Image (spheres, rainbow, N blue to C red):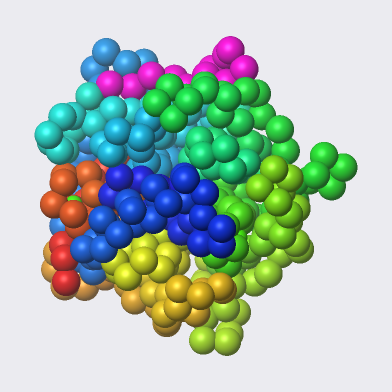
Amino acid sequence: MCVAVVCTVSGRAQPSPAATASAKEAAAATSLNFVALTDPVALAWPKDAPTPKKPLMPLLTDWEGDQQPDLLVSDGDGKLWLVRLAADHAVALKSAEAVKAGGKEISLGKVFQPNYVDMDGDGIPDLIAARDRHVLVFHNSGTREKPEFDDWTFAGSYKSPVLLPEDAGPRLEVADWDRNGLPDLVAGTWSGAVVVFLNHGTRKLAMYETALHVTVENKPLKKAYICSVRFLDVTGDGAADLVLGINYSYISVYENRTRLSMPMLRKEAKVLGSDGGPFEARKLTDIKHIFPAIGDVDGDRVADVVFGNESEKLFFAKGIKR
Ligand SMILES: [Ca+2]
Ligand SMILES: [Ca+2]
Ligand SMILES: [Ca+2]
Ligand SMILES: [Ca+2]
């Protein structure tokens, strides 16, 4: 599914009306790119909303398809908050409300990386979360404009649900890795690897293959430790790139050199900070591990980063175009 400002890759084989719309949005996003971020500023949680339990893990997305970015934020209780941004691209949080599924507030007991992707091909994004190595899907039985969620089911077949790596924790990105039109599961790990579960089922019935280790220039990607994962186009060529929050503090981009099938990733490029050195979130804020949410918050068509984690705050760092 696509966001107003940033697109995860959607399928190109036999495009559905939804896929066509996604393609248009992707074309509109071609000027997006960033290589540097300004120093982060804290975003005050909306005053009249209940205080979420830390840590906070955000996703920049478009909740109701109005082309305005919204935040979905998971908290330490495993609740999910729909956080509205201020109008006219002012960088501020306007309101926060708990998201419900099956008639009650979502509460998974621990923080998760939110995903909002159409899992069943009905053109309406669903919610996806990782918990205890399992992938939980909250089917959206509402409409694009007015989402409503059923209680969760496991991703994959009921008898053999996908089992994420033991040290994946909340680190799950849902995106079409191999461009076959079906969303895949991309898990980061504490031990510094990234694995992909390709979906070789159908739109209605996902079937995931065993985990593949992501490679960069033919070598398995292996960081010292902790990779949180995003897979979306940050260079503006229509091909999704691998973006990692690494080793507590850094953000790295592995540019994808092909729009065909499996990604071909260039070697790591660290996102820079205002001093010209690598952007280092821990030096600048009180966070411990960075889980970057990426999208254009301030409306200048350059992707920005919002992050939280190990903090009751969210931070905004403005993207600077190359
Ligand atoms: Ca919106
Ligand atoms: Ca759906
Ligand atoms: Ca796929
Ligand atoms: Ca921006």
Q: Number of marks in the image? A: 0
Check if residue 101 falls in the magenta segment: yes
> Position of 173 compared to 150: left or right?
left
Q: Residue 289, position in %: x, y?
A: 42, 52
Front-lying residue, 306 or 233: 233
Residue 61 higher or lower than 78, as above or below: below
Residue at image position (67%, 61%) is 198
Determine the image quadrant of residue 34: bottom left
Residue at image position (45%, 73%) is 259
Most extreme residue toward the right is 159
Front-lying residue, 257 or 193: 257
Q: Residue 22, position in %: x, y?
A: 40, 50
> Position of 139 compared to 52: left or right?
right
Q: Residue 157, position in %: x, y?
A: 80, 44
Residue at image position (72%, 38%) is 154
The quarter of the rendered structure image containing the C terminus is bottom left
Residue 206 higher or lower than 70, as above or below: below
Specify the principal SS of the magenta part: strand
Q: Residue 234, position in %: x, y?
A: 32, 63
Most extreme residue toward the bottom is 218
Query: Over which residues does the magenta segment extend?
Result: 95-105
> Position of 175 compared to 273: left or right?
right
Check if residue 80 falls in the magenta segment: no
Residue 171 visible (yes or no): no
Determine the image quadrant of residue 49: top left
Determine the image quadrant of residue 257: bottom left
Residue at image position (26%, 43%) is 315
Front-lying residue, 184 or 110: 184
Residue 63 visible (yes or no): yes
